[in-house]
Image (spheres, rainbow, N blue to C red):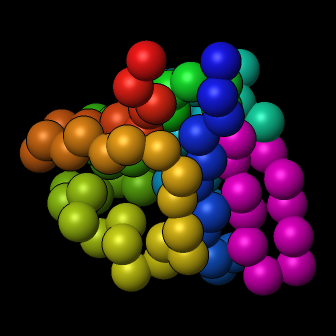
């Protein structure tokens, strides 16, 4: 199975987002660097709006993620409620 990943800037805004991603993807592996956090997952990684809202205590538009996104790897499927990174078989 191929690895997908999402790399985000390290800042106060992304800390609860990273926590939400890890909560929703318990098998994901975090690679923390001085200025970024890379989240790796085998085959699939899901970012859920609801989990981010629960941890931030505010409404969250998943488009906001792009402000702090450095790069990503995988095919992207996005709805208003979640972003899914995956590799097609």
The answer to whether residue 54 is seen in the rendering is no
Q: Is residue 86 above or below residue 34?
A: above
Q: Relative to residue 59, is residue 10 depicted above or below?
A: below
Up-down: is 73 above or below 14? above
Identify the residue shown where x is 42% and y is 55%.
56
Query: On the image, which quarter does residue 66 sit in?
Result: bottom left
Give the percent coordinates (x, y) of residue 49.
28, 43
Give the tally of numbered discs. 0
> Residue 84 location in percent, x, y?
35, 36
Residue 44: % across, % down: 50, 26
Residue at point 13%, 41% (across, down): 79
Q: Can residue 35 be seen by looking at this rendering?
A: yes
Q: Is residue 77 left or right of residue 88?
A: left
Q: Relative to residue 82, is residue 81 drawn left or right?
A: left
Q: Quadrant of the C terminus?
A: top left
Q: Nearer the viewer, residue 40 or 20?
A: 40
Which span of residues is magenta-colored? Answer: 30-40
Is 20 or 79 nearer to us in this picture? 79
Indicate whether residue 4 is drawn in magenta: no
Picture quarter with the N terminus: top right
Q: Is residue 55 left or right of residue 75?
A: right
Q: Nearer the viewer, residue 14 or 8?
A: 8
Q: Residue at x 56, y 75 (%)?
A: 70
């Amino acid at each position: 199975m191929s690895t997908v990943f999402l790399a985000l800037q390290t800042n106060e805004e992304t800390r609860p987002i990273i926590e939400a991603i890890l909560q929703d993807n318990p098998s994901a592996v975090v690679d923390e660097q001085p200025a970024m956090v890379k989240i790796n997952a085998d085959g699939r990684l899901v970012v859920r709006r609801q989990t981010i809202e629960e941890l931030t205590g505010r409404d969250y538009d998943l488009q906001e993620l792009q402000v702090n996104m450095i790069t990503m790897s995988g095919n992207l499927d996005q709805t208003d409620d979640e972003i899914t990174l995956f590799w097609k078989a």
